[in-house]
């Protein structure tokens, strides 16, 4: 009886399946054929003024657009919501003609008027490309009929319908949501030398780009500079009211990490370098020799100020070795400035090599100390703009007292906004040093470039730089830059301290079971700018 009931309930499902099968299978075959045609057949070479662009597309989980500029690399951005990725490659650029077009722009209308014909050519090229994509997609859907043993006009029409549905799913949300200004926050992949040129100055990202014409002017300027960069040093992009600072951390005795940082400082033409600690690893007597590399940081032929705060792996000898460099400024409950941006630093109160079993105790100590850090910031007039610590725990209750906190320690990028304070955590510029070499999957080299507004004295954006592996001859194929815009960057900071737990506020010393072993006190002379 039970088996009979199961069979009777299965019969309607079987009838539904038999009814839908003649429709579903052709629709699926047509959709697959259309997607394959879009992926492998849709290409278009468009001539836009002095530039030849090769356009292609493919289905993707998220909408994006990538502009490849051989041999420099590529820039990409999330430009739309449709499940399709566009790829444009510049196959040929008449650089002299492009330069003359920019140089001959009329004074009244500027580049906007000079590049208006290029905008119209680009619009036509985009329309032709989308039309070609739709037609070839439909043609590909018709090929789905070959998957059926019994082919008929009915099956052919249903395959065509399946392809049309797939193409609508690709194109309708893409066309409706496409936003070229997404390139204000681009991601760069390629060779380190050309990253500053291709992604441009952060001010070009923060300014509102209301029209495609303005965006094309920006792309043309950056492209011209990029090709000129083959024979010339990277151009000065530090203007526009920003102060560039290179943030490194956790170098851990890795000379290759220092070499990378020095190249980044030169290519991005930064105004100074901030090191949030852990230059050492075990505290051995030989380690301080690595600190001599600090004096090698230069940009535009000038030695750069190098701000340093002690990490939990930095011995007193390491701190003294860093301070011995003429361009170094070791900060410990002290402050200094870089082009008007005030940095206040507090060294890590612990020295942890061989003390791994006391990790929880050290973290509790730092959270308790962070109350003093917040009070010290409030006591300074004027208030510092940036707090430098190694471990984010040391800034726990300093959040809300200062506009920006730069730290490291975690060997991973971090970015959050706490009570108005922008917390920026670097990865590991030394790829975790000797410990990282033992990992099966080594950690990447990482650093950050921050762009501070000269009026608000807060970062407008941060470029996250990642290098998966380094070769001695060049930094190619593994280098990437991701720009993140910080929306609060142009507004003045308003203090909003984080609430302190009563037990810490009343008796912070009782929060610790026993006093941790700390490195001996180190006295250094802070060099003022």
Image (tube, rainbow, N blue to C red):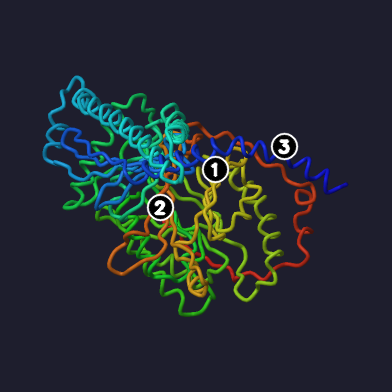
Return the mark for residue 227.
Answer: none
Classify mark 3: residues with Cα within 10 Å, few (<14), some (14-19) or many (20+). few
Q: Total label count?
A: 3
Q: Residue 68's x, y, as percent?
A: 30, 46
Q: Which residue is mark 1?
A: 422
Q: Residue 198's x, y, as percent?
A: 30, 45
Looking at the image, residue 199 lies above or below residue 295: above
- Residue at position x 50%, y 58% in the image: 427
Circle 1 — which element?
Answer: strand
Asked whether the viewer can see residue 287, the reply is yes
Of 29 and 458, the residue lying toward us:
29
Asked whether the viewer can see residue 526, the reply is no
Of 68 and 192, the residue lying toward us:
68
Classify mark 1: residues with Cα within 10 Å, few (<14), some (14-19) or many (20+). many
- Residue at position x 88%, y 47% in the image: 1
Circle 3 — which element?
Answer: helix
Q: Nearer the viewer, mark 3 or mark 1?
A: 3
Circle 2 — which element?
Answer: strand
Q: Hey, which residue is sitting farthest right in the picture? A: 1
Answer left or right for 341 relative to 399.
left
Q: CA distance from mark 3 to mark 1?
A: 61 Å
Q: Earlier in the sequence, mark 3 or mark 1?
A: 3
Q: CA distance from mark 2 to mark 3?
A: 68 Å
Q: Which residue is mark 2?
A: 246
Q: Which residue is mark 3?
A: 12
């Amino acid at each position: 009886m039970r088996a009979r009931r199961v069979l009777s309930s299965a019969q309607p499902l079987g009838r539904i399946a038999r009814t839908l099968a003649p429709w579903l299978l052709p629709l699926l075959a047509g959709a697959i054929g259309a997607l394959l045609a879009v992926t492998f057949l849709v290409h278009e070479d468009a001539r836009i003024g002095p530039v030849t662009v090769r356009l292609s597309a493919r289905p993707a989980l998220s909408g994006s657009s990538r502009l490849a500029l051989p041999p420099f690399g590529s820039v990409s951005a999330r430009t739309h919501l449709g499940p399709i990725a566009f790829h444009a490659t510049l196959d040929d650029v008449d650089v002299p003609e492009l330069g003359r077009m920019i140089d001959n722009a009329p004074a009244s209308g500027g580049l906007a008027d000079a590049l208006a014909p290029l905008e119209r050519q680009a619009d036509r090229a985009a329309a032709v490309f989308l039309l070609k994509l739709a037609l070839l997609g439909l043609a590909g859907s018709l090929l789905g009929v070959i998957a059926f043993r019994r082919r008929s006009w009915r099956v052919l029409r249903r395959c065509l319908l399946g392809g049309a549905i797939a193409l609508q799913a690709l194109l309708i949300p893409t066309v409706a949501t496409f936003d070229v200004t997404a390139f204000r926050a681009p991601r760069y992949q390629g060779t380190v030398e050309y990253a500053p040129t291709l992604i441009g100055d952060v001010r070009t990202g923060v300014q509102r780009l209301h029209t495609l014409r303005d965006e094309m002017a920006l792309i043309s300027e950056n492209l011209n500079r990029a090709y000129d960069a083959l024979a010339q040093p990277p151009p000065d992009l530090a203007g526009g009211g920003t102060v560039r600072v290179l943030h490194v951390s956790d170098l851990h005795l890795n000379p290759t990490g220092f070499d990378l940082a020095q190249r980044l400082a030169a290519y991005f033409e930064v105004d100074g370098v901030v090191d949030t600690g852990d230059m050492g690893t075990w505290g051995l007597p030989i380690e301080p020799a690595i600190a001599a590399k600090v004096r090698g940081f230069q940009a535009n032929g000038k030695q750069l100020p190098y701000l340093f705060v002690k990490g939990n792996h930095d011995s007193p000898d390491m701190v003294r070795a860093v301070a011995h460099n003429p361009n170094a400024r070791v900060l410990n409950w002290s402050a200094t400035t870089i082009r008007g941006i005030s940095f206040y630093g507090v060294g890590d109160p612990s020295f942890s090599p061989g003390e791994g079993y006391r990790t929880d105790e050290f973290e509790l100590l730092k959270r308790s100390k962070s109350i003093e850090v917040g009070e010290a910031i409030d006591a300074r007039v004027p208030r510092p703009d940036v707090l430098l610590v190694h471990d984010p725990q040391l800034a726990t209750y300093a959040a809300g007292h200062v506009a920006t906190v730069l730290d490291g320690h975690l060997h991973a990028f971090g970015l959050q906004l706490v009570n108005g304070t922008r917390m920026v955590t670097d990865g590991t510029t030394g790829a975790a040093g000797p410990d990282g070499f033992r990992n099966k999957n080594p950690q990447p080299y990482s650093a950050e470039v921050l762009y501070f507004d000269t009026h608000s004295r807060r970062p407008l954006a941060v470029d996250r730089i990642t290098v998966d592996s380094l070769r001695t001859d060049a930094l190619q194929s593994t280098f990437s830059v991701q720009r993140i815009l910080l929306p609060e960057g142009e507004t003045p900071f308003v203090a909003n301290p984080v609430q302190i737990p009563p037990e810490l506020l009343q008796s912070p010393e009782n929060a610790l079971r026993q006093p941790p072993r700390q490195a001996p006190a180190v006295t250094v002379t802070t060099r003022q700018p």
